[in-house]
Amino acid sequence: MSSQDIEKYRQAAEIYQGSAPCKKKSIELLEEMSLPKGILPLDDMIEIGHNRSAGFIWIRQKKKYEHVFRKIGRKVLYEAEITGFIQNRRMWKITGVKTKELLIWVSASEMYIEESAPEKLMVKGPAGLRMNFPVSAFELEENKMEIKK
């Protein structure tokens, strides 16, 4: 997905701008979709948009951001622009999110919670790599461990 794709969905979207409104909206949207509220631990967002009819979501940040989810010891890179589709318990066709696996960055293309295993978050990469993590690892964190670039 690219900025051109965002423009395609922009007209019928709810759009929020500014760090505080974007943070609030991202948490509300994740909660509404039954996804962990801490999965997008972003503070420097400049815009978030959600086209409900298509399920398309985008987030623009001032710059890319690396975050460590301490409970699972995973480093995640959030690019300056993140896009994807979202529905209940699922995000797919995600762009702009990568996780560190051994020595390489692997894109996360899909995240979901199965009804049969509501305590696990499944993460898939475009090459079929699957990982599962406890949902509790993605709770909102008061004191985040941030990695400056």
Image (cartoon, rainbow, N blue to C red):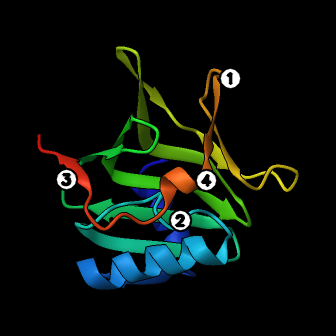
The amino acid beneath tag 1 is Gly
* Residue nearest the viewer, comparing 100 with 143: 143
Residue at position x 64%, y 78% in the image? 32
Pick whichever of labels 3 and 4 is earlier in the sequence: 3
Give the image location of residue 54, x and y in percent.
69, 68
Q: Is 36 located above or below residue 78 in the figure?
A: below
The quarter in which the C terminus is drawn is top left
89 over 52 or under it: above or below? above
Mark 2–mark 3 Cα distance, whole angstroms, equals 18 Å
Q: Which class describes the residues within 10 Å of circle 1: few (<14), some (14-19), or many (20+)?
A: few
Q: Nearer the viewer, mark 1 or mark 2?
A: 1
Amino acid at the residue labelled 2: Ile
Per the model, the C-alpha gap separating discs 3 and 4 is 26 Å
Position of residue 101 relative to residue 15, above or below, is above
Disc with the residue nearer the chain's start (4 vs 1): 1
Real-space Cα separation, disc 4 to disc 2, in angstroms: 21 Å
Identify the residue position indicated by label 3 in the image: 63
Residue that carries the numbered disc 2 in the rendered image: 57
- Residue at (51, 68) in percent of width and height: 37
- Judged from the image, the secondary structure of the residue bearing numbered disc 2 is strand
**How many angstroms separate mark 1 from mark 3 (CA)?**
28 Å
Residue 1 appears at what percent x and percent y? 49, 47
- Tag 1–tag 2 contact (CB < 8 Å): no
Write down the residue under mark 1: 128
Residue under the image location 57 percent in, 62 percent down: 36
Instruction: Of the two numbered discs 4 and 2 on the same chain, state the one appearing first in sequence.
Output: 2
How far apart, in angstroms, are the residues tagged by discs 1 and 2? 23 Å
Q: Secondary structure at mark 3?
A: loop
The answer to which of marks 1 and 2 sits earlier in the sequence is 2
Of the numbered discs in the image, which one, if any, rests on residue 135?
4
- Outermost residue on the right side: it is 116
